[in-house]
Image (cartoon, helix red, strand yellow):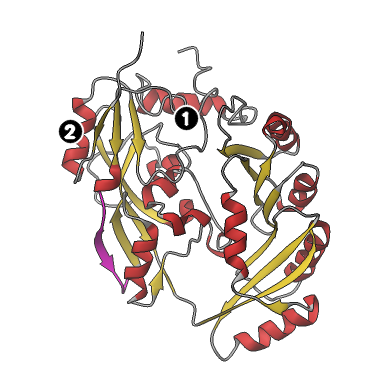
Amino acid sequence: MTRATPTTVRPADLGALRDAVLDSAGTLGVTGAGTAAAWGGTLAPVDTVIDVGGLTGIITHNPGDMTVSVHAGTPLRELQSALADHGQQVSFDAARVDVGATVGGLVATADGGPAALVHGTLRDLVIGMTIVLADGTVARTGGHVIKNVTGYDLAKLMHGSYGTLGVVAEVVLRLHPVPKATATLAVDCTLDDAAAHAGRIFDRPLDPAAVEWYSTGSASGTLLVRMEGTVDALPRRVERLHSILGAAADSGAWDAHAAAVRGAPGQAVLRIGARPSRLAALVGSLPCATAAVGLGTGVATVALPADAVADAHAAVHAAGGTSVLRDRPDGFTGPAWGPPPSAIALLRSVKRTLDPDGRLGPGRLAPWLQEDPR
């Protein structure tokens, strides 16, 4: 029996989103700009797809408080452009922002970028959220309360939930000033040498804004160190950094870094999180075609042969890290996630509480949630 094509609905406001959830009797998938459609587990066939791309725009911007509330379907690059007029920004620079990723999608996939070294991920920048749960409940956290949900910090639960616990409708974000001056130094080196350089940088009071290494296919690669500060003070800090690295200025290298993070069509791309002190050795042990390694954040993105993904998951797990598939070649049937975390029972309990009928995002966290006997 062939399953019917799912109905797609595109609500334009919170009320319409709530109605869409209530009026849909079966399973639900959530989509936005589609920049992470291949991330995590493959969405199982669903009855209804909710497209949050119609929920766009700034709701409230308070420049004095340095906060902004936006609809979840707002592309972050558009939000950044609007905030720049006030000298403010969301201090977040995931690679897929440039290709249209939305605020809600970036939260749902727990994405991050080099700026996480100083400012953290969206988990740290989100200070409020409005979510529609599987039963149509509209829940707010970090603001005026419509309904509290059993004491959960919903904003943090939604971060990395891949649309399996609720539909993010509105997000309140903490802002930071746009830096007055920035500079990037780049040095060609191996990953081992980059890790040694990073150790020397972090041992000194240089306060780098980002420390990343990337390679596009050779044993060597490029270490990037971004510095931010005032127009008067930054040159002296850059000079001290130059004395350590002997590196040249190259602000345009971040485009190449972002390309390494995004991977290329036909590749299996894995996102890895591990203790920073272990990350370089871990990535170095994998058969990477390309790699981008956050030497301070402990997050790496690597492209691998499809038949190496399962072993890579196992290696990351053995090192005490986590891993998730972020792109896959056609026909790939390997695991999207590594071995389940120690908190898997808690994850399943939260899922049962917020979505007892298993309506939201079936397959996205497979096999972790699907292993739950209910």
From the viewer's perspective, is residue 213 above or below residue 281? below
Residue 170 in the image: x percent, y percent? 29, 49
- The residue sitting at 42% across, 26% down in the picture is 351
| Residue at disc 1, secondary structure | loop
Residue 285 pos. (x, y %): 80, 43
Please give the range of residues in magenta: 55-65
Give the side of residue 330 with respect to residue 311, left or right.
left
Q: Is residue 60 magenta?
A: yes
Q: Quadrant of the N terminus?
A: top left
What's under tag 1, amino acid-wise? Arg
Q: Is residue 293 visible?
A: yes
Which of the pair 2/354 is nearer the observer?
Answer: 2
Q: Is residue 12 left or right of residue 368?
A: left
Quadrant assignment, res 312: top right
Residue found at the very far top of the displayed protein: 1
Is disc 2 placed on a helix, strand or loop? helix
Q: Residue at x 77, y 41 (%)?
A: 287
Q: Nearer the viewer, residue 209 or 11?
A: 11
Badge 1 crowding class, 10 Å Cα cut-off, few under 14, some 14 to 19, many 20 or more, is many
Image: 349 above or below 20 = above
Do tag 2 and tag 1 residues touch (Cβ < 8 Å)? Answer: no
Above or below 153: residue 217: below
| Residue 214, above or below 346 | below
The spot of residue 167 in percent (x, y) is 32, 38
Q: Which mark is residue 19?
A: 2
Residue at image location 44% in from the left, 37% down from the top: 162
Q: If the image is split into quadrants, where does the C terminus sit?
A: top left
The image shows residue 267 at horizontal and vertical percentages of 62, 40
Who is closer to the viewer here, 96 or 70?
A: 96
Q: Which label is found at residue 300?
A: none
User: Mark 2 belongs to which amino acid?
Assistant: Asp
